[in-house]
Image (spheres, grey):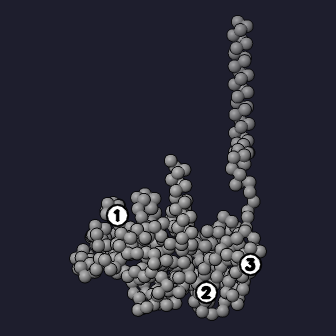
């Protein structure tokens, strides 16, 4: 049974690598230079927070809303105006109650992990995220920008998320200029080095889990 | 009487012999362990192999070999430490300034480690840049062929 499972994971890994179905789940702002870089790197779809009109035509682009919420009320009021079918909604929780509401609310697609939100993600939050199938989003540029202490807390959350609770993780670049883009191979290997998972598993964080969310929302990932 | 004496002396001899064997085995434990490992785990006996990673440098300015080498080693040491750097032994063996690509030689165990840190190089001496891994090869000849587009 174990060998069959391993073989199936390996086959899936090879299939994804062959197809090159990589999705960058968070681009802060998109311009033509960044778009060209992402196309060259082999991404097939991207999710963008701010975009220039007609900045990118060679790649499938989805829109994203990032909501920073300090309280339950603020989060609910900000979620009220967001179209569910048009946007991918991600939440940066800035308090325990906003983190809990974000995990429960079906309008929220992912919860962003950064230096400030790491301390609100505890075992109750993990259980809620497990119950409501909410993935955690890990931005590589957030990791790059935060202080060493924040990185320690982010690592703790990531480690528990993957190894103890076995929940889905989504990796994104969080790029806003062309030299902040992250190559899929780099992202896969970085995660496998950081949280000690094989590349066969970490490839899912950049392809399978983001794709699942897009498909669930009724978007067409491949043109 | 004789039989009792014989049994007692035999058991004494056996006890002494087992004690000697135990001491011998304990003193040679490391050697035995090595022998067993070498018999069953072939990987341990293999020598360190080299890999050549072809990298493409996208930059707004022209970059020099020393600058790239310095940036690579700094980032590698920052993430994996000096021990990791010494074990990996990354060396920039070929650099094409015009094409903006280079070949890095590294210990085969650390190829993934090298690829994993490339996204952290964003500027070299104030020049914006981006490092993209193209391919990993086993020989420098093949790396050259990949670099100049002769094979994919």
Q: Position of residue A70 (x, y in %)?
A: 29, 77
Quadrant in which residue A19 is drawn: bottom right
Q: In this view of the protein, which residue sits in the foreground, B21 or B132? A: B132
Pointer 1: residues within 10 angstroms few (<14), some, or many (20+)? some
Which chain contains the residue that carries disc 3?
Answer: B
Q: In this view of the protein, which residue sits in the foreground, A34 or B90? A: A34
Query: Which residue position is annotated with label 2?
Result: B58
Q: Is residue B80 visible?
A: yes
Spatial CA distance of label 3 from label 2 is: 18 Å
Q: Is residue B82 visible?
A: no
Q: In this view of the protein, which residue sits in the foreground, A80 or A16? A: A16
Spatial CA distance of label 2 from label 1 is: 39 Å
Pointer 3: residues within 10 angstroms few (<14), some, or many (20+)? some
Give the residue displayed 24% in from the left and 74% down from the top.
A72
Circle nearer the N terminus (3, 2): 2
Q: Is residue A184 left or right of residue A209?
A: right
Question: On screen, A8 above or below B85?
Answer: above
Looking at the rendered image, the disc whose residue lies closer to the viewer, 1 or 3, is 3
Quadrant in which residue B146 is drawn: bottom right
Give the residue displayed 56% in from the left and 74% down from the top.
A186
Query: Which residue position is annotated with label 3?
Result: B144
How many numbered marks does the figure carry?
3
Query: Which residue position is annotated with label 1?
Result: A133
Q: Quadrant of the C terminus of chain B?
A: bottom right
Q: Is residue A78 left or right of residue A166?
A: left
Secondary structure of residue under mark 1: loop
Q: Position of residue A203 (x, y in %)?
A: 51, 67
């Amino acid at each position: 049974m174990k060998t069959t499972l391993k073989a199936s994971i390996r086959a899936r890994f090879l299939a994804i690598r062959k197809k090159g179905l990589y999705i960058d789940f968070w681009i802060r702002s998109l311009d033509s230079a960044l778009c060209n870089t992402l196309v060259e790197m082999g991404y097939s779809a991207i999710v963008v927070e701010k975009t220039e009109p007609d900045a990118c035509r060679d790649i499938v682009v989805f829109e994203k809303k990032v909501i920073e919420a300090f309280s339950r009320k603020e989060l609910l009021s900000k979620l009220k105006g967001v179209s569910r079918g048009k946007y991918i909604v991600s939440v940066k929780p800035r308090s325990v109650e906003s983190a809990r509401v974000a995990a429960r609310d079906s309008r929220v697609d992912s919860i962003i992990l950064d230096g400030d939100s790491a301390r609100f993600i505890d075992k109750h939050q993990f259980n809620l995220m497990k119950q409501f199938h909410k993935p955690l989003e890990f931005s590589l540029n957030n990791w790059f920008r935060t202080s060493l202490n924040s990185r320690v807390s982010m690592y703790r959350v990531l480690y528990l998320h993957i190894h103890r609770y076995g929940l889905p993780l989504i990796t994104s670049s969080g790029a806003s200029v062309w030299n902040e883009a992250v190559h899929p191979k780099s992202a896969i290997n970085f995660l496998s080095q950081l949280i000690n998972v094989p590349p066969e598993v970490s490839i899912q964080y950049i392809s399978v889990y983001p794709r699942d969310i897009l498909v669930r929302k009724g978007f067409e990932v491949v043109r | 009487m004789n039989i009792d004496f014989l049994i007692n002396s035999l058991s004494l001899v056996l006890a002494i012999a087992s004690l000697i064997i135990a001491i011998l085995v304990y003193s040679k434990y490391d050697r035995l362990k090595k022998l067993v490992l070498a018999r069953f785990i072939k990987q341990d006996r293999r020598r360190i192999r080299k890999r050549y990673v072809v990298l493409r440098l996208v930059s707004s300015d022209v970059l020099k070999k020393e600058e790239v080498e310095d940036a690579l080693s700094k980032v590698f040491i920052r993430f994996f430490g000096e021990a990791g750097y010494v074990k990996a032994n990354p060396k920039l063996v070929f650099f094409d300034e015009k094409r903006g690509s280079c070949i890095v030689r590294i210990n085969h165990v650390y190829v993934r480690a090298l690829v994993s840190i490339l996204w952290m190089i964003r500027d070299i001496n104030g020049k914006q840049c981006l490092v993209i891994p193209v391919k990993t090869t086993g020989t420098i000849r093949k790396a050259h062929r990949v670099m100049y587009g002769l094979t994919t």
